[in-house]
Structures are given as structure tokens and as C-alpha cells.
Image (cartoon, rainbow, N blue to C red):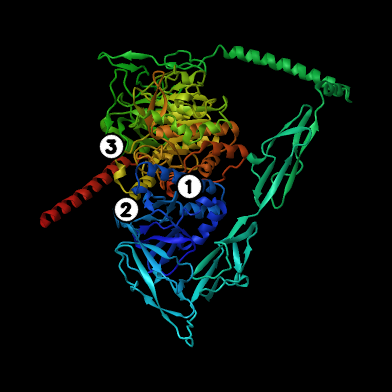
Amino acid sequence: MMKVTFYNKRLLCYIDDTDFTDYQGIGADPMYLRYDSVYSIVQNHIAEEYRDFLARPFYEDGLIYWYVAEWIETPVQLSELNGSKKEHYKQIKEETLKQYNKALSQLNAEEHNILSSALKYVNDDFIYCYDNKVVLIAWGMRPDTNKHKVSGQWVKGLKNEEKCTITFDCGTQGKIKGHFGKNIHREKGARLTAKDIPEIIPNDGYIFTRWSTDPIGYEVTGNITFIAQYEKAEKSETQKQPDEQIVIRFECGEYGHIEGNEIISINKGEVLKQDMVPNIQPNEGYRFIGWQPTLVFSPLYSDMTYVARLERETVQCRFIPGEQGDIEGKSILTKPKGTTLSQSEIPTIKPKKGYKFMGWSQSTNCILNHDYVFNAQYERILPWYKRLWLWFTGKGCLKWLLWLILGLLAILLLLFLLRGCKSCSSEYHKDIYGNEVLDNDTVIPVETVRDADGVVRDKNGKIRNIYEDGHLPNENVVSPIVGDDGIEPPIVDNQGAPDVIANRLNIYFDTDNPDLDKWAQDFKEQYPGDQYQIIGCDRNVPMIQIMIPESERDKIRNELPERIKSSSFFVVDESIIQLQGNVSSVQNDELRGWHLKAIHAQESWSISKGSSDIVIAIVDDGIDTEHPMFSGKFYNGYNVFTQNRELSCGQGHGTHVAGLAAGNLQFLSDGVAGIAPDCKIMPVQVFDNGMCTFSSLASGIMYAIHNGANVVNVSIGPSFNGLDQLPLEEQQKIAKSYFKNEERVFRHIIKVANDKNTVIVFAAGNDNVMTAILPNCRETNNTINVSAVTPELKAADFTNYSIGSNVSAPGVSIYSSFPKKTFAMLDGTSMAAPIVSGAVALALSIKPDIKVEQIIGTMQQTGKKSDRYVPPILILDKFLEAVKNGNIASGVLSDNVDNESQYSDKTSQRTEDGYSAIKQMIEQLKAQRDAIDKKINELEQKIK
């Protein structure tokens, strides 16, 4: 058992180091061995009333003892409290953590890493409450649940039993030595040790002989008094006792160093002298302000540890507006020495009439090593008539000739524009029905038809052969998925992977401008029968879609590269794409708009609400064109199947997503608002009567990129439901090795987007698997892939996570627009993605040339940390403040799957059969589990 004490500290409990895991550390040392480094940061950056939050550890023989400030009421675990008392201490806990989190935001990188590691695990089972304070033990580690299942089994030494009073009565012939009091308190059943017994100093003429009852080893059963026993001493008798030594330690932490002895020994009861105390040499920018506890030069009776208190030196910055203007903001700032001023700290100058503010008398970007005074500098502005008069009366007759030439040029330009408008007005883009396409800012509901069975369907055109007279059409054609008779195509079900349409294949090309007509001619030469048709082409992607007999799909997919060698192409199955959002399982009115508060949306709108020049494309199942949240907000809407601006409401998914990204603020009081309310919306429909495919999604994204979208939100994607049965190692193999041709298509799309400075935002998916399994989410430096968090800012139980995700946002119980002209609460990464898309649009409104990698890095840099496997959560006001002030990150935290994901010229033209491989992996896993279950049953039978 340990033999150490700390000033004003009391042993609370102890733990076995083998019962815990995931120890945080500094260098090679676990955090509990570097308490001085942690406390030095706490002491310099945390208010005094919160400094006792982290209990002081002491390690000995595999046990970690936890010391806390002295208590009056017995400490109790927060998890054991209930009722109003629990709420009281929960509030204290939240306020304490708020203080520490505030400090984290102001620390340098090294300090931040140390303190954030100490606070990584905050578990109510290890928070003790007493005397209106909370204390955390076992910090910087987490319990190993393989050792114990019941929380109380981790902590030892603290019992909440009845306390008994033990009194030591020294009588009148002596006194108690040192700091011992007359009374101590121990629990019933405790045994007294020599450490509990005070030392008696007898008066002159007396000798202390014993206690009335021997206290050492005494088992406490109730209150008891021990009475000191004395004998008279003979005058010649001396009572000299050997001097007992105590140890005094001096500690400094990482912001300075000790000059002198760090450990000294003195006689028990001796007074510590000033010349025994070492000097402290602070690091640059810090100053020594004293010791904790304060040095008292009086007799000491126990081992002591003194910790040097160091604080940052400060400098004062004064901003003087002068007589020509007024200052808005703080005119005097106190800053730590050696730091710099941020843009938000520099006050604004409002010049008086007739003056222009030109800047400060010296640079505000300097390193603050001493006090500074910044004087505002102004320039006198002459009235306009004076400036005009000076210009006209100035030297140079050529000015008149210059004006004449400019006037003639303006007239010619105006005539040219008027002529151009006239010629443009006579030419209109046509849709598949030959109708003129509506104006850019107009979107209307799609036409519907009723089947013989009475089912109402969207009229998205017919599936037809588009290859006529040896040529493909000039316009892009995305084939409808559902036939005009309402019959769905044949579908191959794939467990754990996306389903595919059995009678279609997609042909994608390696070059940007392939000869699609030549490929089509070659295909019809090889497959001349009417059962082999070309039903789609998109020159933007570029791609061709063929329809073939269902029974020949695998054969044709494999033999096409051998039979057509005139073009460099590869084949991709036509997989089914799903929505990544569902009706929320918790319809709680109190949660309406929680996502706006969580990311600080309203605070951010004082920085920017967006610009009408910035367009967010919503590639989805359509939109409620008449919803009041979208009044006057549409730009270049598009239905990929009809090639016009007639869009369906779909299942309401696209309406919900669009409202989150850029809906207006008309319904803010109800908890509904777009993140970028002043930006435009480009709705792009890629669903045909509830179905979306790989090719329609690719074409929809490419349309948005080529038609003015600055941000493309994609809240839809392939489903890998069931793969969460596989361990992460197996999931990573899938991300590295399968669906490479689908990934190849997305790499091309992403490159085109990056070249045009268009940012693509993908929903990470809702299958609780590694995000990088999705082929569109593997380029984490070039697209934003969004995971979902709960109102508690923890990872949602459905969200995809780990490699592939690079930003998180609220995605549970999200309230937004819904057809028809109403609102609904949905769950999903579908909801998280448009929140981030809105944030990207606001950033582009502030800084149009900001790159996607800079956006990702800055979101991560300013975001809030969440669970281990999901990336930082978007905090909108901090993100926009950083963009506005130029504090833009240069790098991204997340990585691609690995270099094996990169392509070379040797990539196969054939679509690898990833679907079959995944089926086989799941079947093998089930077989292994069945074998284990069988073995367990056999063992249970033997035991019985």
C-alpha cells in the first residue's frame, strides 16, 4: 500500500491498471504518469474553481490511486445519483466541461493534444460528486469491458457506509504534534494503522507511555476515544528521540525548468527555509507567479510536493481612432506575449464624412512581443464636384478624345447585344417531345399518366432504340428505367451489394471525346439482331447504354472488349441507386431545428447568408415545385429522362434535401431553414417512378457540373446493406479491390468537377459500414463525404463511417420541407449532406476561388470532434469565420483507401464480378457462424 500524501488532497479510491485499456499518453508515458504536464496546462488556462476536476493520480505496484480535494459530504458517483440532485450535478459537470472545451480552443497544438487526450473519455461512472463540485478519476483511459461488465467493479476503496468518530484525548499532560486533529473519521470495519495515530508531545516532567487501548490494528465498530497515558519523568532523564526525515519535492511542468534541487530532505518538524527553495527559469513568453500550494515557512511534518505556477506573459494593444473616425469594437486588447492578432480582434473604423480610412500606423500582423499602439490613418475625400472640376481642368486635351472614343464603343456594344438577343430569342432547346424548354428560373410539375390498373405514374418517356441511320442523336438521352406500360425491368438481387438491372450494360470511355457513333456502328456490326439495342448515350460523361437479352448479359459483358477494339472503353453494370434518408423513428417536436443550433447556423448568417450567384444542385428524386420555401430560387432545373424542366415530387426526399441546403427563412420560427438561404437551387431529377440507376445518377451529376452548379449535393447512392456483418478488415478489402470500374467513372466525374471548381458533396450512406466501400466516396481529398450524428453529437447507429468519410453533420430527426407544401422529420446521411452543401455554398459566396481540399481541411480544423470513427462535426460560424479571415487549412485529415485504389493504363475493361464475391464472403461468414453455433450447442448438451 502507498505511503504518499498530497497537500490538501485526500485519497478517494484506486483502480487496477489491468482493468483499463486505450491509455492516452505523452510520448512513451501513459497520461497518469505525466500529471504535472496536464496540471500545468489546467493551472494556466482553467479558472481556479474548476481546476480540481481531474483527480491527481499516483501509481504504485500496478495500482493507480486517485487523490481529490478534501470533502465534507461523502463523494458519490454521478451515475448513482437520481432526481434533483443528479440534475444539479449534471449541470455542474456540463459547466465544467464547457470551461475545459473553451480552453481547448485557445491552446497551441501541443497543449491541445495533451488536454484533449486527458479528456477523451468522460464517463459518469468515474465522475464523483460532492460539496458542489465534480471530480473525474480514471481519465485518459477507458474500462476494459472484457474484464468487468458491472461498472462498480472497476473502482475500489471508496465505501458509502456509516462513518465513526475516533477521538484521541491527549489530556493535560501533553499535546498532539503537528497537523493531526483530535478527531478522525473512519468507516465501520476499518482497521486503524500507525498512520492514523497522532504523535504525542508530553509536557516537561512527563513521559508518554501508551494509549488506554492499543489503537493499532483496532477494528472500528463505533465511536471510540483513546486516552493518552503518562508517567512522571525523573529530572535526570532525557527524552531525546531520533530525528525523522520528510521529503520535499519541487515540480515545474513543461513551461519552464528548475535551477537547483528538485528533491530535498529535512527533519520532521523543521522549517523550510528560503535558500532551500530552487529557482524557476520560465520559458520564453511565460512568467513564474508562485508555488501551488503557497510556500509557508513554518514547521513541516509530512512529505510535500510544490508545483511551480507559470502563466503566459501578456502585452497590451491600443487602437486609437483619432478625430476623423469612430471605433467599433474593443479599443484595448490584452494578448499573450508572442501571439498575433486575428482579423476578428481588430476593431473596425467608421470614418467621418469627408474621410476614408486607409489602415493603421503599423502592421497588425506583427508578433506581439511588447505593448503596441495602433493609430488609424485617413485620407481626405474631396467633394465630387471638386474632383470633377480638377479632372476637367487638368492637363491633357486627349481626355476629351478618349471620352468620344469610349462613347462610340458603348453604342456599338449595345447594338451588338440587342442583335444577339434577337437572334437568341428565335432558338430554343427542345425536350424529347419536341417542346421548347422553359426559362432557366422556371420548374413545373411533371405530366402524369394513369395505368389500366389505375396507378398514376410520372410520364418520363419511352424506352426506345436511339441508333438510327448509322448515327446516335446529338442530344443526350438517358433511358427511362420503368417502361411506358409501367413494367419494371428484370432485376438481379445481390445480398450485401446493390441490385442490378439484368438486361442493360453501360459502356464508359477512357478519353474525353470518344467517337460514340463509331462505337455504336461497331456494336451493331457485331450484334445486328433487334434484341440488341442502344437505348442511351450521354456525350458529357461520356457513355452509351445497351439493352440485351437477360440471359446473355454475362457473356456479352466479358466478350465486348475482344469484339470491339476500335475504342478504349470499359463496362459497368447498371446498378440500382437508393435514397439515403428515411422517415425519422423519433417524431419529437422539441427536436425541430436542433441541427440549426448544433452547427450555430443563425450565428453564421451574420457572416454570410449566401449569394444568388452561387447555385446548389440537388441531384435527387425531384422536388415540390410549388413549396413556399423555394419561391424564386430555381435555376436550370432538369429531368434527365425528359431533358426538360418538368420534375416529379418523387417520394419527397429531394424536397427535404433542397430545403435543408438552401430553403428560405420564411419558416425559421418553426425550426425550418436552409443553410444557404440566399443561394439558388438547381433540382436535377434522376429517379424514374421511384427507381434510380448508376447511369442516370452519373448523367445527372454531369449535367449539374456543365450547367452552372457551384455545389452538387448527392444524397443518394448504392446500398451495401448486410456488409456490417463483416469485420472492418474485410470491409477494407472490398473498398480496395471491388467495384473498381464504378470507381473509375466517379474519378472522371470528380476530375471534371474539380477542373471547373465545382464541389461535390456525397452522403456517406446508411448501412453502418466503411464509407470507402461506396465507389463514389474513395477520393477524400476531392469530394466531401458526410457521416451523420445524433442530437447528442454522437455517430448515428446507421451511418457509414471510418475511411471514406471526411466531415460529419446532424442527420437524425431533421425537420425540413416536404410535399405537398408541408414539412417532415427524416433521418439519414441524406440529411447531413445538404447541411454541409449549404455550408460550402456560403464559403463560395465569401471566397469564390476556394478549392475543395481547402474547404474540407478548414471544416475539419474548425469542427467539433465526435466519436472515434466519424470525422469532425461541421461548426458553421467557426468555418465561415476562418474562410472570411483567410485562416484556411492547407491539408486534409482523412486519407484515400490507399494507393492501390489508383488506376493505371492496365485497368481491366471488364466489370469485375464484385457482386458474386461479396455474396461468397457473406455466405462464408454465415457458414463460420453456423459452425460455431453448432459447436456451442454440442458443448451445452455435454454440460447438461
Name the quadrant of the C terminus: bottom left
At 77% across and 42% down in the image, what residue appears? Answer: 361
According to the picture, the residue beneath numbered tag 2 turns out to be 151
Residue nearest the observer in this picture, 362 or 671: 671
Name the quadrant of the N terminus: bottom left
Q: Amino acid at mark 1?
A: Thr
Q: Are marks 3 and 1 in contact (CB under 8 Å)?
A: no
Q: Is residue 923 visible?
A: yes
- Calculate the distance from the C-alpha at mark 3 to the C-alpha at mark 1: 51 Å
- Calculate the distance from the C-alpha at mark 2 to the C-alpha at mark 3: 43 Å
Mark 2 or 3: the one toward you = 2
Whichever of labels 2 and 1 marks the residue nearer the N terminus, that label is 1
Q: Quadrant of residue 871?
A: top left
Q: Is residue 894 visible?
A: no
Whichever of labels 3 and 1 marks the residue nearer the N terminus, that label is 1
Indicate whether 671 appears above or below 167. Answer: above
Question: How packed is label 1: few (under 14 Cα within 10 Å), some, or many (20 or more)?
Answer: many
Indicate whether 678 appears above or below 192. Answer: above
* x then y, percent, for residue 927: 21, 48
Question: How packed is label 3: few (under 14 Cα within 10 Å), some, or many (20 or more)?
Answer: some
According to the picture, the residue beneath numbered tag 3 turns out to be 494
Indicate whether 875 appears above or below 284. Answer: above
Whichever of labels 2 and 3 marks the residue nearer the N terminus, that label is 2
* x then y, percent, for residue 718: 36, 35
Q: Quadrant of residue 695?
A: top left
Residue 285: mark in rendering: none
* x then y, percent, for residue 472: 43, 23
Q: Amino acid at mark 2?
A: Ser
According to the picture, the residue beneath numbered tag 1 turns out to be 96
